Amino acid sequence: MNVYDARRMADVLAPLGYAHVETPEDADLIILNTCHIREKAAEKVYSELGRLRQLKGDREDGGDPMMIGVAGCVAQAEGTEMLRRAPYVDLVFGPQTYHRLPEMIARALRAAGETSGPGRGVIDTEFPVESKFDSLPQAVETGPSAFLTVQEGCDRFCAFCVVPYTRGAEYSRPAEDVLAEARRLVEAGAREITLLGQNVNAYHGAAPSGGEWRLAALLEALADIDGLDRIRYTTSHPRDMTADLIEAHGRIGKLMPFLHLPVQSGSDQVLAAMNRQHRVEDYLRIIDQLREQRPDLALSSDFIVGHPGETEEDFEATLALVRQVGYAQAYSFKYSLRPGTPASVMKDAVPDGEKSDRLARLQSLLKDQQQAFNDSFAGLTVPVLLDRRGRGDAQLAGRTPWMQAVHVDFEASSQADAAYGRTVSVRILSAHPNSLAAKPNEVTASTQEAAAV
Ligand code: SAH
Ligand code: SF4
């Protein structure tokens, strides 16, 4: 979501004459787009700001002004505190106000002309009534694989999570807007679109002809767009995995057979403390129903270890759930206390050493599952959307339908050039923990044929 937001900030800034540069040294404006989900993320922002302060000082000593902005959820949560801790920062703004960047920059430039030193920074951490999506310029630039935010914020209030406080209340973009943006992305070369939302399957946007569409209806309409080959969505809450959405996985061929469905814990007691509003049994039933619809569905998840009150027995229940489901990949984290959340005042904190130990055990199991999943592809032929350049001129990288990263070695750079941005049939040569190595399925003299699916 931050990648999407950063792209949109660049779209807002383009008419002002700003363009990307390769190094911070060359920039007139540096924006750190930040995440506040875990404590480490916030600390990283301050240490990065410390480095930029030096750079800004050097630049300004030479009479060349440079602006520093902090965007995203750390900015939203810290607000004025950020200007106190880092008074050289010029702009502090949250995830819901970046459409106002031109105005903020003008104010910051005026302030810099009038005063210098602390107290001149511009802050905008409001949750405006108008949606930023209504004021953003059209998204135009894209690679073969694009992100598209359809839903933001969250009303679920899991006990450990800051998202409802930093991103704000849940909001779904009207379906017509989403479809128009998707069509533009496809015209600009996107072949895959990943719909984004903090809780994307809670999507309930205004339908084109009145009423509301849930995510399944939106997916159905997107699947009708010619030239769009692949659709994904992330990230989902088990409680919003409705019957129509589960069925969509069987019905919509363009919907890729990979789902990120975070469960956080395999213990009902911990799930209750987390306020996840479902039991382990409900999660497993959803997985069964999904696999009935789409037998080749691969799954990924998020896990938190060491939530307040988690016992060794609770943790072992998480390991048991992982063994039962079998994941293609997953993200796992030590519980991180977020001030202001209900979990932050819960008793029975788990000691850090214990959290580290549990994380290592969980990650070892998840790593084995990921390796086994990747190993099962050795020798197979799979379609890969080649959306990135690889090492050297003759290598491209992309993803399988099941989200594995693949490096494809072509015989010549001309073949690689012809295949870029296309879905190509490749043969998997070897499997690694985080990627697969492959060659085009049929290497022929004709690059056209080599690039054909
Ligand atoms: N909406 C998604 C999650 C978005 S946050 C869901 O409900 O599943 C992404 C992930 O960060 C979460 O799934 C969780 O595993 C992790 N996370 C969130 N808050 C955390 C915290 N306080 N400590 C550790 N991990 C956290
Ligand atoms: Fe956070 Fe996800 Fe829970 Fe919302 S549903 S509060 S984003 S963990």
Image: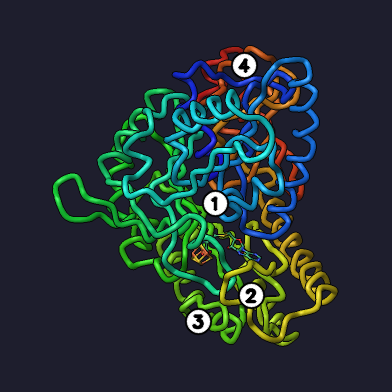
- Which mark is in front, 3 or 1? 1
In which quadrant of the rendered view does residue 347 lie? bottom right
Are discs 2 and 3 less than 8 Å apart at CB? no
Q: Which residue is mark 1?
A: 76
In what element is the residue under mark 4?
helix
| Amino acid marked by disc 3 | Arg
Q: What whole-number distance in Å separates the C-alpha atoms at marks 2 and 3?
A: 22 Å
Specify few, some or many for label 1: CA neighbours under 10 Å numbering under 14, 14-19, or 20 or more: many
The residues tagged by marks 4 and 2 sit, at their Cα atoms, a distance apart of 55 Å
Among all residues in the image, which is located at the extreme front?
A: 114
Which residue has dot 3 on it? 279
Q: Position of residue 71 (x, y in %)?
A: 57, 42
Q: Which mark is residue 344?
A: 2
Residues under labels 4 and 3: Cα distance?
51 Å
Please say whether residue 411 is visible from this viewpoint: no
For disc 4, the marked residue is: 415
Say whether disc 3 or disc 1 marks the residue closer to the N-terminus. Answer: 1
Q: Which structural element holds mark 2?
A: helix
- Above-or-below relation of 127 to 271: above
Is residue 267 shown left or right of residue 422?
A: right
Lower sequence index among marks 1 and 2? 1
Q: Is label 4 in contact with label 2 (beta carbons under 8 Å)? A: no
Q: Are marks 3 and 1 in contact (CB under 8 Å)?
A: no
Q: CA distance from mark 1 to mark 4?
A: 47 Å
C-alpha distance separating marks 1 and 2: 19 Å
Residue 117 is situated, as x and y percent measured from the top left of the image, at 69, 34
Residue 27, how many percent across, how many down? Answer: 67, 21
Depth check, mark 4 against mark 3: the one in front is: 3
Q: Is residue 50 above or below residue 301?
A: above
Q: Amino acid at mark 4?
A: Gln
Up the image or down, 412 lies above or below 405; here it is above
Q: Is residue 426 left or right of residue 177?
A: right
